[in-house]
Image (cartoon, rainbow, N blue to C red):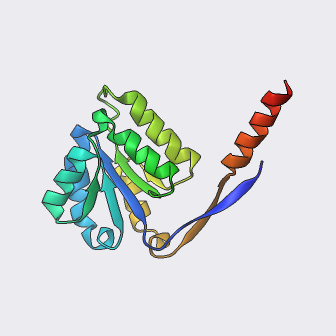
């Protein structure tokens, strides 16, 4: 497999997302980490981003609500290389009507190898990492090469 290097710059582009039962936890976490978060670009799904902005005064680019496509919008920004870190406090005890979108979002974050926290402990580890203040280079599969190779195999059949 061939890989390419991607660099997450010193100023991170962080998605902040939370299911309803976890929104207050995320807001409190943002308040606790406001000084650090204010140095980065923040993005979020509709209701969550609005609540964080109102409670903290942080600037956050909001997309649609998760059930209305916001999770997919955030996923697209990961694919485009815009968002390179994600805090997604999901509620494992409540069924979500948009669960396929949630799974797609977490899958794409894994595919693109971005730092991702799905609970407060991991979010604390990420935000307090020494890598928050410097560039970080990581390897991901060269998807363009993968597509070319698959197309060639299909043509040969």
Which quarter of the picture shows residue 20? top left
Please state the horizontal and vertical placement of residue 60, each as a whole percent of the image: 26, 60
Identified at 44% across, 56% down, the residue is 83
- Along the horizontal axis of the image, is 91 left or right of 1? left
- Relative to the observer, which residue lies in front, 125 or 9? 9
Q: Is residue 42 above or below residue 78?
A: below
Please state the horizontal and vertical placement of residue 75, each as a whole percent of the image: 44, 45
- Relative to the observer, which residue lies in front, 154 or 114? 154
**Residue farthest toward the left in the current orientation of the protein:** 54
- Relative to the observer, which residue lies in front, 20 or 100? 100
Please state the horizontal and vertical placement of residue 101, each as a whole percent of the image: 40, 33
Identified at 17% across, 63% down, the residue is 56
**Residue farthest toward the front in the current orientation of the protein:** 155
Please state the horizontal and vertical placement of residue 7, each as a whole percent of the image: 57, 66
Q: Is residue 34 above or below residue 120?
A: below
- Along the horizontal axis of the image, is 3 left or right of 80? right
Q: Is residue 106 above or below residue 112?
A: above
Identified at 82% across, 32% down, the residue is 153
């Amino acid at each position: 497999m061939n890989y390419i290097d991607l660099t997450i710059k010193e100023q991170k582009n962080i998605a902040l997302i939370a299911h309803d039962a976890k929104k207050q936890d995320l807001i409190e976490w943002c308040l606790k980490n406001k000084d650090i978060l204010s140095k980065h670009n923040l993005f979020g799904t509709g209701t969550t981003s609005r609540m964080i902005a109102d409670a903290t005064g942080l600037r956050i680019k909001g997309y649609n609500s998760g059930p209305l496509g916001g999770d997919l919008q955030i996923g697209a920004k990961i694919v485009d290389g815009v968002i390179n870190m994600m805090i997604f406090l999901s509620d494992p005890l409540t069924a979500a009507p948009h669960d396929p979108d949630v799974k797609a979002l977490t899958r794409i974050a894994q595919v693109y190898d971005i730092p991702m926290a799905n609970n407060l402990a991991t979010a604390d580890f990420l935000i307090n990492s020494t890598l928050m203040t410097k560039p970080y280079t990581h390897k991901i599969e060269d998807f363009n090469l993968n597509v070319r190779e698959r197309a060639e195999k299909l043509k040969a059949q």
